[in-house]
């Protein structure tokens, strides 16, 4: 996949200046005349690669706003507000709903996505003027290039819409440099309509296999899956269901037999990956870099240190709650593959939580749960080791397609299929797909005999009653499976919010004022195995705020346009 991104992005210079201010830095023609990108197929392909490059963290290290782009702001905003993941320091505000319109991650997400959209729009405008004769395969190649960029732009718009709702929709040729003032659509349908149309147009052109076998390219499966997700946001579940069915029936994707394999650093582009971004380490010692210690291009290092236990040099950006840890059923192998708790040993680093620092249920001055994610922490973090291997950020997995399809089935009166699909995901969760694997040296011992996974409908009927949920059993089931399948990944908060379970999830899984308040009794807090929620859940904050600087610099957006709750 790396070869896709190794070309020069001709004619575009990243981080140019907004015509109104230095706030939103976007792309513009600089070193070479813009027309040069569109005078040959070779140069156009280099420009296309530049659009793909926006999926990556910047290679300019910690000094830039986008140093952990694609990973840290994405997992924070997709998880912390559910309280299943938590953070210390200034990141803690995302677990307590104390974020504001000036919180940096919102600006970072806004800048990152609109920088990508600007690249795409410049490319689409230039490509449209190219004569078919410039391409070896004529119109076919030109349409394939257009389809890929339409899909990349749509993906960025979809990500923005999930976070902010109505957003300015820049068209081909428009960037924040030449169109600094752009209003939001009057309704959210105005946002979703363009996303759906662009993905549908791309799906009609692209094949299931990536072009030229280059994994990392946009495919038909990408376009159909994200189009279906957009349809779910519109409440068009019949249409979403049909799109997901195409993806399932294609036979292109399947669940990886061992859930834990998904997060092994050397595992990239498995049959489960609908779309992934593979990070790499370009050079060795982590103590290098312009600022004396922080690497410029060691992308995997950012992932490890952001998620490792603080006891073993982690930075405190990601802890797992005790409530989430205890919510797994006995025999669900996803827990051991996802997290390591106090007294347990990380199977990959052989480091035990509680061995070095004081053995406490909660850790640090802010009383974070003493549980770390091992989806990303599978190498020791000592600042000196060389980490030269790829690491995949799995933006969309087949398991997500299946659970979204299950939700669509329930919403369209097809409960039998919905429960069957959930049980299909649970078969892997309980290890029954591992029994044919022969991997005796794997850090987590493989399951060798088939077990009876508890039937989903029966189990969740009881779970719903025990927790006191008012929601329908299927809605609890789909989201609890998402909870265990996608913990610390990129979708759980958005799925809870879109499906309508978020408010009740917070109230039932994290009841207010239960347990010991660490602000009142710090000593007792260390022995309390619960998250102490002392704030009222605010349903008006479930859309994130339009960044404050955007409102100040975009004349077409007034303070009255801000999302509710801010």
Image (cartoon, rainbow, N blue to C red):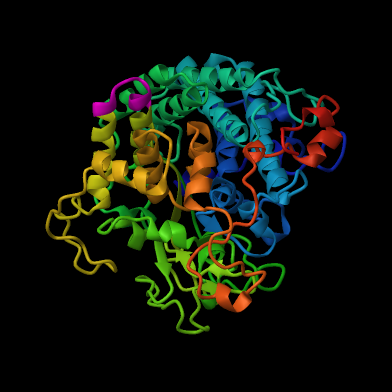
Q: Residue furthest left?
A: 449
Percent coordinates x, y for residue 179 in the rendering: 79, 25
Residue 418, compared with residue 352, is above or below; it is above
Residue 79, compared with residue 145, is above or below; it is below
Q: Which residues, given as a range, are shown in magenta?
A: 408-416
In the foreground, 245 or 188: 188
Answer with left or right where residue 484 lies relative to residue 11: left
Q: Residue at x 49, y 17 (%)?
A: 201
Percent coordinates x, y for residue 423 in the rendering: 24, 40
Q: Residue at x 63, y 64 (%)?
A: 88
Q: Residue at x 37, y 77 (%)?
A: 350
Kindly report the secondary structure that dominates the magenta region of the rendered protein: helix
In the foreground, 421 or 474: 474
Percent coordinates x, y for residue 165 in the rendering: 64, 30
In the foreground, 249 or 479: 479
Res. 10 in view: no
Where, quadrant-wise, is the C terminus in this rendering? top right
Percent coordinates x, y for residue 451 in the rendering: 15, 54
Residue 350, compared with residue 159, is above or below; it is below
Answer with left or right where residue 289 lies relative to residue 182: left
Indicate yes or no whether the magenta region holds residue 284: no
């Amino acid at each position: 996949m790396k070869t896709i991104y190794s070309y020069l992005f001709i004619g575009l210079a990243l981080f140019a200046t907004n015509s109104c201010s230095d706030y939103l830095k976007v792309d513009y023609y600089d070193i070479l005349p813009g027309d040069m990108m569109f005078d040959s197929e070779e140069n156009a392909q280099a420009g296309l690669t530049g659009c793909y490059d926006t999926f990556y963290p910047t290679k300019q290290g910690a000094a830039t706003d986008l140093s952990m782009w694609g990973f840290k702001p994405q997992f924070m905003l997709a998880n912390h507000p559910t309280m299943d993941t938590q953070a210390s320091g200034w990141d803690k505000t995302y677990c307590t709903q104390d974020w504001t319109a000036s919180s940096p991650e919102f600006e970072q997400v806004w800048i990152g996505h609109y920088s990508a959209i600007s690249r795409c729009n410049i490319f689409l405008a230039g490509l449209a003027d190219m004569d078919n004769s410039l391409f070896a395969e004529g119109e076919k190649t030109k349409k394939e290039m257009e389809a890929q960029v339409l899909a990349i732009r749509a993906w960025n718009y979809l990500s923005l819409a999930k976070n902010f709702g109505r957003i300015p929709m820049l068209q081909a040729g428009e960037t924040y440099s030449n169109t600094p003032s752009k209003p939001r659509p009057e309704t959210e349908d105005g946002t979703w309509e363009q996303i759906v149309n662009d993905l549908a147009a791309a799906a009609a052109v692209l094949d299931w296999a990536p072009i030229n076998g280059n994994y990392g390219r946009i495919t038909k499966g990408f376009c159909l899956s994200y189009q279906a997700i957009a349809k779910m946001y519109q409440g068009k579940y019949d249409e979403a269901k049909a799109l997901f069915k195409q993806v399932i029936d294609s036979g292109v994707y399947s669940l990886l037999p061992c859930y834990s394999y998904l997060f092994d650093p050397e595992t990239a582009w498995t049959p489960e990956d609908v779309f992934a971004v593979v990070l790499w380490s370009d050079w060795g010692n982590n103590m290098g870099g312009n600022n004396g210690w922080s690497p410029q291009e060691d992308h995997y290092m950012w992932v490890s240190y952001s998620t490792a236990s603080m006891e073993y040099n982690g930075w405190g950006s990601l802890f797992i709650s005790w409530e989430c840890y205890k919510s797994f059923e006995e025999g669900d192998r996803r827990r051991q593959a996802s997290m390591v708790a106090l007294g347990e040993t990380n199977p990959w680093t052989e480091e035990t939580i509680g061995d070095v620092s004081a053995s406490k249920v909660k850790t640090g001055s802010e009383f974070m749960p003493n549980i770390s994610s091992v989806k990303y922490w599978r190498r020791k973090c000592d600042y000196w080791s060389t980490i030269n291997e790829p690491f995949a950020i799995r933006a969309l997995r087949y398991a997500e397609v299946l659970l979204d399809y299950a939700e669509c089935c329930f919403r369209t009166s097809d409960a039998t299929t919905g429960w069957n699909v959930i049980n299909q995901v649970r078969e892997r969760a309980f290890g029954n797909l591992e029994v044919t694997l022969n991997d005796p040296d794997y850090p987590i011992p493989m399951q060798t005999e088939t077990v009876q996974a508890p039937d989903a409908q029966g189990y969740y009927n009881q779970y719903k009653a025990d927790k006191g949920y008012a929601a329908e059993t299927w809605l609890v089931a789909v989201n609890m499976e998402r909870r265990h399948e996608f913990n610390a990944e990129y979708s759980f908060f958005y799925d809870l919010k879109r499906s309508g379970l978020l408010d009740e999830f917070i109230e039932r899984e994290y009841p207010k004022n239960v347990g010991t308040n660490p602000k009142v009794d710090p000593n007792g807090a260390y022995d309390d195995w619960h998250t102490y929620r002392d704030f009222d859940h605010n349903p008006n904050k479930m859309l994130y705020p339009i960044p404050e600087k955007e409102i100040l610099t975009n004349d077409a957006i007034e303070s009255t346009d801000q999302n509710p709750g801010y």
